[in-house]
Image: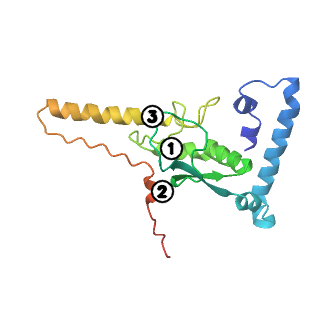
Amino acid sequence: MNSILSDHEFLWGTTPNENEDSDLKKLEDKFKSILESINTQHIKKEFNQFLDSIELLFLPKKFEKTVEEDNFITNKRISDSYKIESITVFADIPIELHIVTVLWIMKYGYKLDAKLDLSCKGNRLLLNKSNNAVIKGSGLFKPYFTQYQQWRDKAVNEAQRKLHSGSKVAFINLDLKRLLLLCKYRLCEN
């Protein structure tokens, strides 16, 4: 973690100047505080404060339409109440946990990603050519939509290739959005 903390270029994208020194010092102090909480968790249990403060926020995603309007969108309330058709769940997580997850991805996550087959397209890390580190000065993940487009285009091209070679092809496109929210999981009882 110390090597990551000392890499100002990765954290800020630039070389520090005099005005940034105090901000950098505050950031390093915050990181050291988080590191102390993690390293002494087995004794002090301080890191639990971050875990205990995680909250799930259930926010409306879609409302049932009661009145059909002609492509007119407004923020004016046209009803006394609205029936929620679907919700979105957001996790409100302390910044300290976000920092820890980013640092974990940078230190260990790339090792897992490098083992994945190239056919795995969702939520892939931006790795260097050697697959031994996350690319510095960049985001952590490849843009999901680009990955999806590559997967979709490859499937369409393969279906067309099969058709041209005389094979019969059934091309089925399933939209499984919100599937995970609708699935019920049975946890192991061991």
Circle 2: element type: helix
Q: Residues within 10 Å of mark 1 (few under 14, many from 20)?
A: many
Residue 153, percent from left and from top: 33, 31
Q: Quadrant of residue 23?
A: top right
Instruction: Mark 1 and mark 2 in contact? Answer it, CB < 8 Å.
Output: no
Mark closer to the chain start, 2 or 3:
3
Going 74% across and 62% down the picture, which residue do you hit? 48
Mark closer to the chain start, 1 or 2:
1
Residue beneath label 1, please?
A: 113
Task: Tell me which amino acid carries mark 1.
Answer: Asp
Task: Tell me which amino acid carries mark 3.
Answer: Asp
Q: Residues within 10 Å of mark 3 (few under 14, many from 20)?
A: few
Marks 2, 3: nearer the viewer: 3
Q: Residues within 10 Å of mark 2 (few under 14, many from 20)?
A: few
Task: Tell me which amino acid carries mark 2.
Answer: Leu
Residue at the far left: name it: 166
Left or right placement of residue 135 versus residue 153 in this view:
right
Residue beneath label 3, please?
A: 70
Where does the N terminus fall, quadrant-wise?
A: top right
Marks 1, 2: nearer the viewer: 2
